[in-house]
């Protein structure tokens, strides 16, 4: 008894212990008796947006469905709802699911290209501000219905270890594609020239390029859901490097992977890509097709003003490796020495790169889109001259057409 | 001076580091960007110069009056009435600053982790601990800071280094005028002036010749680290810097799968937990000390109870979301900074002047 008294005295002399006991009693008990979060919230991993009837927004939500299975397959369902605004559509989707909508796990937002033909920034703004979506969430535009797209994604996610959002995760590493997230979208939108690129992914037929996962027999995607459908069994997801060029959230044009490659050569932020030279002749090769792998592209921009006009010098150090040589009637042994790139090959490669970079500049000029943020570069190096130069222009968006570019790629071989 | 309640210069320097670094790398960089773009970095420099000025004033005062408390000095030179007025203002200052710091921390954790939890849980987690910190002796607090400092410093340094990995773009310079910079500095002046705690515990700091360098070194260390994180933040997010409210967390989160570690932004969360507890604890300690000067007959517990009641009332009724917190921090608190940047420096200057005049008269 004495010991207990002593112990109690000790407890009351230690205020933090009392706080601990308080927390355990008042929060520990109720927390143990609480429902699992998964019963309260629907875990959404992807959102799809389509234009509906009467200007409504059709919302599709790829929902994770926790089911006990003997394999490790994750089960998903697509839930569709429609509302006058996005907020209303999300509420309706929650009602369909009988749960609150939890968007913290969303990794991908698929938007039908119709939104970008008008102005998608209001929908994206709602998602960013009101639902605490991470700014690193991927944005994808598609020509298919976002609902169909998510149904294909559902099959994909359920039956394979590759998740659909992984398909664009490493886009920025390839010379043919771009990074497309909320962050990159807003960075472009709030940049001085308000231009941004959105990754474009289409659904292809079975016999075309792309990736598809056949539904396995254990796939429980046939689990009934009032709003889910199974219409897209044969569709493939095709990430072909295409992108929508937007200005102020509105689509201007669609760029192909070749055009993206030309622009990326001016940006330099990629780690893999290939340049092909056809009909090449030198001491080793006769009418050959040479493929060079690009490992690195170190770009150095210098700006000078000549007679009030900015001249941009783009010095590009391109590190390449001749990785493939195709030519008729030659044995492979004769191509052992392909690592040694001849001066002729370097010259040809230089010419090709110049051509690509020139095309890239032309794309920027034609679309009045400063995708490489040249405005910032010129302004930061010569603020007063740049201000004067811009004041003289009638159409300030068209400033790239008056900038002189001097491109000099230098080739370094491994 | 009771030996048990005194702190050495290392502990004081560590407290300076903690109080300067804490909560200046969360909301401030994005708020500065909103008003002054990349030139927001100059706002930091201007306000930190004022902060360093306060440290310099403290050192001058400490050299002149090594064993006298600030309250005794005020009482001696200006009388009891002025003493009570100044310490009442200090109480209001520390209370209001605590409300701001608490709200910034609360919103940070609510946005990122405890989305569904109510304010009461957060109060239960924070209030008892900062009350306990304020209740225990200054020496114990100094030792606690000393104990945690290596962890805090290493984690902070890690965050600073890693933040430079996230740099991807170049922001647009020369967009703001001097007016924008000064206006932004004035709007957010309330987030500075933290080293005022030195004056509150003036008689309890063991100061010897040459110790001023240590104080300045730790202050500059914190300042350099804050400026580096802010530079990295502006270069990482450039045009979208105003959208990212939690700078140190966001620069860490911007690094994709760094070294296979995945989400290393959690490290920034740990740092903010440590810093918030210690900073709030120190502020509450300053509040209780000022309360004791104002009402010397009342015990420490009364100061804490008074604080808890007013604090819960303000937090629960007035400030609950980010917009209100920013409104409060930008529109109400700057007026209170008159205490830290005008009244206290003015008092110190008068103390120095009076003594000099007195000496001349004696001669």
Image: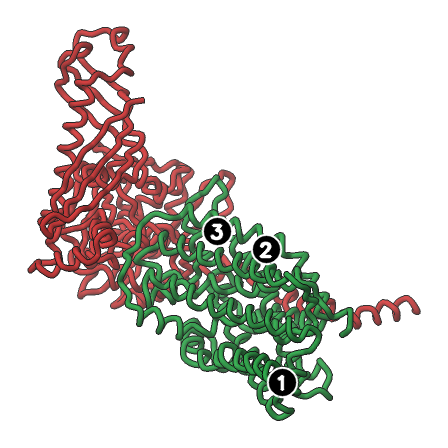
Chain colours: A red, B green
Is label 3 in a helix, a strand or a loop?
helix
Nearer the observer, A378 or B128 = A378
**Of the two numbered discs 3 and 1 in the rendering, the one whose residue sits closer to the viewer:** 1
Disc 1 residue crowd, few under 14, some 14–19, many 20+, Cα 10 Å: few
How far, Cα to Cα, is label 1 from label 2? 46 Å
Is label 1 in a helix, a strand or a loop?
helix
Q: Chain of mark 1?
A: B
Farthest front residue in view: B363
**Of the two numbered discs 1 and 2 in the rendering, the one whose residue sits closer to the viewer:** 1
Identify the mark nearer the N-term, 3 or 1: 3
Residue lying at 24% horizontally and 57% vertically, measured from the top left: A191
Instruction: Give the number of the disc on residue B358.
Output: 1
Disc 3 residue crowd, few under 14, some 14–19, many 20+, Cα 10 Å: many
Instruction: Give the number of the disc on residue B13.
Output: none
Q: Chain of mark 3?
A: B
Residue lying at 12% horizontally and 47% vertically, measured from the top left: A306
Check contact, mark 3 vs mark 1: CB within 8 A.
no
| Coordinates of residue A228 in the picture (x, y in percent) | 32, 52
Does A351 sit left or right of B180 as displayed? left
Q: Which residue is mark 3?
A: B160
- Marks 3 and 1: same chain? yes
Identify the mark nearer the N-term, 3 or 2: 2
Disc 2 residue crowd, few under 14, some 14–19, many 20+, Cα 10 Å: many
Q: Chain of mark 2?
A: B
| Coordinates of residue B75 in the picture (x, y in percent) | 65, 87
Residue A181 vertical position relative to residue A168 in the rendered view, above or below? below
Q: Which residue is mark 2?
A: B152
């Amino acid at each position: 008894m004495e010991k207990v008294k002593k112990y109690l005295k000790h407890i009351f002399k230690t205020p933090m212990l009392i706080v601990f006991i308080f927390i355990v009693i008042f929060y520990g008990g109720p927390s143990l008796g609480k429902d699992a979060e998964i019963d309260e919230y629907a875990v959404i991993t992807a959102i799809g947006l389509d234009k509906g009837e009467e200007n409504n927004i059709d919302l599709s939500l790829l929902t994770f469905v926790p089911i006990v299975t003997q394999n490790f397959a994750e089960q998903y369902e697509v839930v569709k709802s429609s509302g006058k605004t996005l907020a209303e559509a999300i509420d309706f989707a929650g009602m369909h699911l009988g749960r609150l909508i939890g968007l913290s796990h969303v990794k991908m937002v698929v938007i039908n290209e119709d939104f970008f033909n008008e102005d998608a920034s209001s929908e994206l703004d709602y998602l960013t501000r009101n639902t605490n979506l991470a700014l690193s969430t991927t944005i994808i535009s598609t020509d298919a219905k976002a609902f169909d797209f998510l149904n294909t994604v559902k099959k994909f996610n359920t039956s394979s270890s590759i998740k659909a959002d992984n398909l664009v995760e490493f886009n920025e590493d390839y010379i043919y594609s771009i990074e497309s997230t909320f962050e990159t979208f807003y960075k472009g939108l709030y940049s001085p020239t308000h231009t941004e690129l959105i990754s474009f992914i289409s659904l292809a037929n079975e016999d075309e390029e792309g990736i598809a996962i056949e539904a396995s027999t254990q796939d429980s995607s046939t689990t009934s859901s009032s709003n889910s459908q199974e219409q897209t069994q044969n569709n493939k997801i095709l990430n072909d490097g295409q992108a929508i060029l937007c200005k102020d959230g509105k689509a201007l044009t669609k760029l192909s992977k070749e055009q993206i490659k030309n622009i990326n050569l001016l940006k330099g932020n990629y780690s893999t890509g290939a340049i092909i030279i056809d009909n090449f002749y030198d001491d080793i090769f006769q009418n050959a097709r040479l493929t060079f792998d690009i490992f690195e592209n170190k770009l150095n921009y210098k700006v000078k003003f000549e007679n009030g006009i900015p001249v941009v010098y783009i010095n590009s150090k391109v590190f390449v490796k001749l990785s493939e040589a195709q030519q008729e009637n030659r044995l492979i042994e004769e191509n052992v020495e392909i690592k040694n790139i001849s001066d002729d090959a370097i010259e040809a490669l230089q010419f090709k790169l110049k051509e690509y970079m020139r095309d890239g500049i032309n794309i920027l000029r034609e679309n009045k889109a400063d995708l490489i943020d040249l405005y910032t570069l010129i302004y930061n190096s010569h603020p007063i001259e740049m201000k004067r130069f811009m004041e003289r222009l009638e159409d300030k968006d068209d400033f790239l057409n008056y900038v002189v570019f001097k491109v000099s790629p230098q080739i370094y071989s491994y | 001076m009771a030996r048990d309640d005194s702190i050495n210069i290392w502990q004081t320097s560590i407290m300076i580091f903690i109080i300067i670094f804490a909560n200046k790398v969360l909301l401030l960089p994005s708020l500065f960007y909103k008003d002054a773009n990349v030139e927001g970095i100059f706002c930091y420099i201007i306000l930190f110069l004022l902060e360093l000025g306060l440290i310099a004033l403290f050192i001058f005062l400490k050299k002149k009056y090594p064993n006298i408390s600030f309250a005794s000095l005020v009482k001696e030179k200006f009388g009891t009435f002025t003493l009570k007025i100044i310490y009442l203002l200090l109480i209001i200052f520390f209370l209001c600053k605590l409300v701001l710091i608490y709200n910034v921390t609360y919103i940070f954790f609510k946005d990122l982790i405890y989305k569904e939890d109510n304010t009461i849980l957060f109060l239960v987690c924070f209030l008892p601990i900062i009350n306990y910190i304020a209740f225990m002796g200054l020496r114990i607090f100094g030792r606690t800071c000393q104990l945690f400092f290596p962890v805090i410093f290493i984690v902070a340094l890690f965050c600073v280094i890693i933040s430079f990995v996230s740099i991807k773009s170049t922001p647009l310079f020369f967009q703001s005028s001097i007016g924008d910079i000064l206006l932004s500095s004035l709007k957010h002046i309330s987030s500075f002036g933290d080293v005022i705690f030195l004056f509150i515990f003036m008689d309890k700091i063991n100061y010897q010749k040459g110790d001023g360098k240590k104080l300045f070194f730790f202050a500059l260390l914190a300042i350099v680290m804050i400026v580096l994180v802010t530079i990295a933040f502006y270069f990482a997010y450039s045009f979208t810097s105003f959208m990212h409210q939690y700078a140190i967390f966001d620069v860490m989160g911007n690094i994709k799968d760094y070294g296979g570690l995945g989400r290393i932004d959690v490290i920034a969360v740990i740092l903010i937990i440590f810093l918030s507890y210690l900073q709030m604890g120190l502020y509450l300690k300053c509040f209780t000390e000022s309360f004791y000067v104002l009402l010397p007959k009342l015990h420490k517990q009364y100061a804490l109870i008074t604080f808890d009641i007013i604090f819960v009332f303000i937090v629960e009724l007035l400030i609950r979301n980010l917009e209100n917190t920013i409104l409060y921090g930008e529109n109400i608190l700057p007026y209170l900074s008159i205490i830290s940047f005008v009244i206290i420096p003015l008092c110190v200057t008068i103390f120095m002047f009076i003594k000099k005049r007195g000496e001349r008269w004696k001669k």
